[in-house]
Image: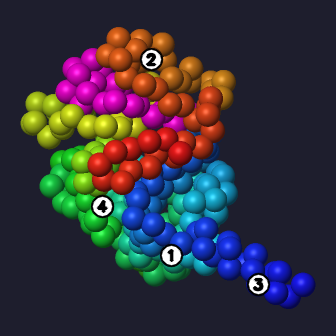
Amino acid sequence: MGLVMLGLLALLVWRQLPDKKLRLVVCDVGQGEAILVSWQSYQLLVDGGPDNSVLSCLGKNMAFWDRRIEVVVLTHPEADHMTGLIEVVRRYEVGQFVAAKMVNDIPEYWQLKKAVVEKGVEVKELIKGDELRLGSVKLKVLWPWKRGSELLAWEKADEKAAVLGSKSYQGDVNEMSVVLEGSFGEFDWLLTGDIGEKEELELVREGLVRDIELLKVGHHGSKYSSSEVWLRQVSPEVAVISVGKKNRFGHPTEVVLDRLEKLGVRVLRTDEMGMIKVVSDGQQWWQE
């Protein structure tokens, strides 16, 4: 019996050994967003969804002995992108936490900040032109174009100083969403957070976007994102929409789906397919 168990354990370990392929996993977290980018032993998690569903997704897509996530990116501090990160930070070793310096005065924000501070995670703010690298995976920040102004947003502060950093961002937090352009060999993708048409057009105007293979559709398919000009510029082969079943917002909207259909873009939706996993060897890509 002992030899059988040892053999099964060895088989499990062998099956979870990293290979040289990139895996981009759009977790099924309902009406929210959480995306895992994995290459060999490196992981980058973008957002954490509206609850702890992300933990199941990580458990299915990370080796059972791997308790480290090299980089966690919070695109913007809204509950549907942020809540699951609270337990991620508590349960995993996080190498670096990337977020804009802004406060959103909701319980989820303060709980996440507490977890980040208690674990002593390094917090970094990245803006347009900055880069991240995970081995052979390159990620370039395309947005936001400026730094946040709330200097105490993610810093440990005494009670008196905390009052100064407790104000909420005066504007739409979606406007500050982190946009990441990723590349692995010949495979390119865009992760867009919840940016809207205004931010899309600015990125197009500045010539910061190009043809890509995969687009994570902005703002869950909202009518305020995915403009025709934007979609024609990025010209994706496949568009992934992270969205909850029968959500109260009506996402994804028909206008966005129609635009994608007219451009001949293949659409993958978490409300219809559950977790979506795209794999690339740097030359070709496929859905796993």
Percent x, y for residue 141?
Answer: 24, 53
Q: Which residue is mark 3?
A: 6
Residue 203 lies in the magenta stretch: no
Q: Which residue is mark 2?
A: 257
Which tag, 2 or 1, sits closer to the chain's start?
1
Percent x, y for residue 61?
Answer: 58, 60
> At numbered mark 2, what does the secondary structure look like: helix, strand or loop?
helix
Which tag, 4 or 3, sits closer to the chain's start?
3
How far apart marks 3 and 1 lie (CA) works out to: 25 Å
- Above or below, comparing residue 190 to residue 147 in the picture: above
Q: Which residue is mark 4?
A: 137
Residue found at the far right of this picture: 1
Q: Disc 4 or disc 2, which is closer to the eye?
A: 4
Confirm or deny contact between disc 4 and disc 3 (CB under 8 A).
no
How far apart marks 2 and 1 lie (CA) works out to: 37 Å
The residue shown at (50%, 31%) is 268
Residue found at the far left of this picture: 206
Q: Which residue is mark 1?
A: 68
> At numbered mark 1, what does the secondary structure look like: helix, strand or loop?
strand
Confirm or deny contact between disc 2 and disc 1 (CB under 8 A).
no
The residue shown at (38%, 50%) is 280
Q: Quadrant of residue 95?
A: bottom left
Confirm or deny contact between disc 3 and disc 1 (CB under 8 A).
no
Residue 206 marker: none
Q: What's the magenta region?
A: 224-243
Percent x, y for residue 224?
Answer: 37, 23
How far apart marks 2 and 3 lie (CA) works out to: 50 Å
The amino acid sitting under disc 3 is Leu
The residue shown at (61%, 55%) is 57
Q: Residues within 10 Å of mark 4 (few under 14, many from 20)?
A: some
